[in-house]
């Protein structure tokens, strides 16, 4: 009768080998997933490992295979439902391929992002998925490749980096939303974003260093130019980084001599704060203020009225990023891939049709 594993002690490869009746080297090959053994031996080792509740020593496996079995992920704001959904997509795809995920939050701070990447590389993650905070500071991202690890950019492609990226079609989405508002008769349309500049003012697209936000603003302004709305740039509001900052910006807009008839929020956290402020002030949505947001957060469908959104394929973005990274880890060699996934405009009840209202007045 084989000796039972003592309680409160972790089973080792030697324990599994002894229980399965094979050599330690053979057990290690089966448990490590390398080398060649017969099906009979593989089954015996796996049964023994299960019976002993064997857990692999990740450090030892890393030293043997050169792999840690982990993927590092750095996102901008883990409290934002957008990134939560993306990380879920990454985790599901990674787990299916046998990888664990180590998550870090940069808070959209470039220094925190650098430190997080340095820590993840030191922990010997096999590859990284990063949503870069700034596209003009990429040295730390280039260092990932120099360290021999593949990198995939999530949601924010950077033209100067020759690496894989996956993002939504932000400019097209912004154009579709702005065009919808214009066709409904809106001419005073504000765009509110957490992205910021040193002066806290929007002057030119190149000042916006987050690619996805810049593309949305460019789409917003492009439609304004097409429709002959000359003052569109002055309606861009930056720095909605906290509920307090969003409140300050929103109150400034709503209390202006000429308030906007519509606000486009760059994410659902900003939109939620704007929605709450409108309720507090007794501003009716959509009769007095129209509202729409990027990201189809759960709350947007259950408010009165429900909020018009750009549904971004967030889970799919994360899933695609993980698959691309895993393909690189498995030896895929090809030019850098730039995947762009379409979005979907979901019309609900938060946009007023001012054009129809004007037509009624003319008829009357």
Image (spheres, helix red, strand yellow):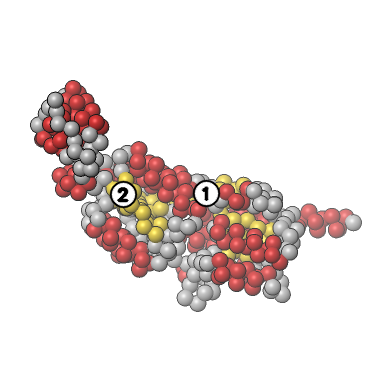
Q: Residue at x 69, y 65 (%)?
A: 280
Horizontally, residue 191 falls left or right of residue 87, namely: right
- Few, some or many residues within 10 Å of mark 2 (<14, 14–19, 20+): many
361 up-or-down from 240: above or below: above
Image coords of residue 177 (percent x, y): 61, 54
Looking at the rendered image, the quarter that the N terminus falls into is top left
Q: In this view of the protein, which residue sits in the foreground, 268 or 335?
A: 268
User: Can residue 18 be seen in this snapshot?
Assistant: yes
Extreme residue toward the bottom, this view = 199
Q: Residue at x 69, y 54 (%)?
A: 351
Q: Which mark is residue 127?
A: none
Please report whichever mark, 2 or 1, sits nearer to the chain's N-terminal start: 2
Image coords of residue 115 (percent x, y): 31, 65
Horizontally, residue 178 falls left or right of residue 327, namely: right
- Quarter of the image where one finds residue 108: bottom left
Horizontally, residue 172 falls left or right of residue 133, namely: right
Task: Give the residue number, with chain letter if any, for mark 2.
Answer: 71
Image coords of residue 162 (percent x, y): 32, 55
User: Can residue 30 be seen in this snapshot?
Assistant: no
Q: Secondary structure at mark 2?
A: strand
Task: Give the residue number, with chain letter if any, for mark 1.
Answer: 312
Q: Secondary structure at mark 1?
A: loop
Q: In this view of the protein, which residue sits in the foreground, 91 or 163?
A: 91
Q: In this view of the protein, which residue sits in the foreground, 96 or 50?
A: 50
Q: In this view of the protein, which residue sits in the foreground, 339 or 241?
A: 241
Q: Count the marks: how many?
A: 2
Image coords of residue 69 (percent x, y): 26, 45
Extreme residue toward the right, this view = 364
Q: Residue at x 73, y 63 (%)?
A: 283
């Amino acid at each position: 009768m084989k000796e039972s594993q003592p309680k409160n002690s972790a089973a080792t490869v030697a324990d599994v080998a002894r229980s399965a009746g094979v050599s330690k080297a053979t057990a290690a090959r089966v448990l490590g997933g390398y080398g060649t053994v017969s099906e009979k031996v593989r089954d015996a080792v796996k049964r023994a490992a299960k019976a002993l509740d064997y857990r692999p020593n990740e450090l030892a496996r890393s030293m043997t295979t050169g792999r840690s079995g982990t993927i590092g992920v750095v996102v901008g704001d883990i409290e934002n439902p957008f990134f939560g959904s993306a990380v879920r997509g990454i985790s599901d795809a990674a787990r299916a391929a046998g990888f664990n995920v180590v998550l870090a939050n940069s808070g959209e701070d470039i220094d925190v992002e650098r430190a997080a990447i340095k820590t993840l590389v030191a922990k010997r993650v096999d590859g990284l998925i990063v949503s870069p905070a700034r596209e003009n500071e990429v040295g730390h991202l280039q260092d990932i490749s120099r360290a021999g690890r593949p990198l995939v950019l999530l949601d924010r492609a950077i033209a100067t980096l020759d690496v894989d990226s996956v993002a939504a079609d932000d400019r097209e989405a912004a154009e579709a939303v702005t065009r919808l508002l214009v066709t409904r008769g809106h001419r005073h349309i504000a765009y509110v974003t957490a992205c910021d500049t040193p002066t806290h003012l929007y002057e030119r697209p190149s000042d916006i260093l987050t690619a996805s936000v810049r593309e949305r603003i460019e789409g917003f302004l492009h439609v304004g130019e097409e429709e002959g709305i000359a003052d569109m740039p002055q309606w861009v509001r930056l720095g909605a980084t906290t509920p307090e900052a969003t409140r300050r910006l929103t109150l400034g807009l709503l209390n202006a001599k000429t308030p906007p008839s519509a606000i486009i929020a760059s994410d659902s956290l900003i939109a939620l704060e704007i929605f709450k402020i409108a309720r507090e002030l007794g501003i009716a949505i959509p009769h007095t203020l129209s509202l729409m947001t990027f990201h189809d957060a759960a709350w947007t469908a259950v408010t009165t009225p429900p909020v018009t959104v750009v549904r971004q394929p967030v889970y799919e973005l994360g899933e695609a990023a993980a698959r691309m990274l895993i393909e690189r880890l498995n030896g895929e060699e090809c030019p850098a891939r730039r995947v762009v996934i379409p979005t979907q405009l979901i019309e609900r009840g938060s946009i007023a049709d001012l054009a129809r209202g004007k037509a009624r007045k003319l008829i009357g």
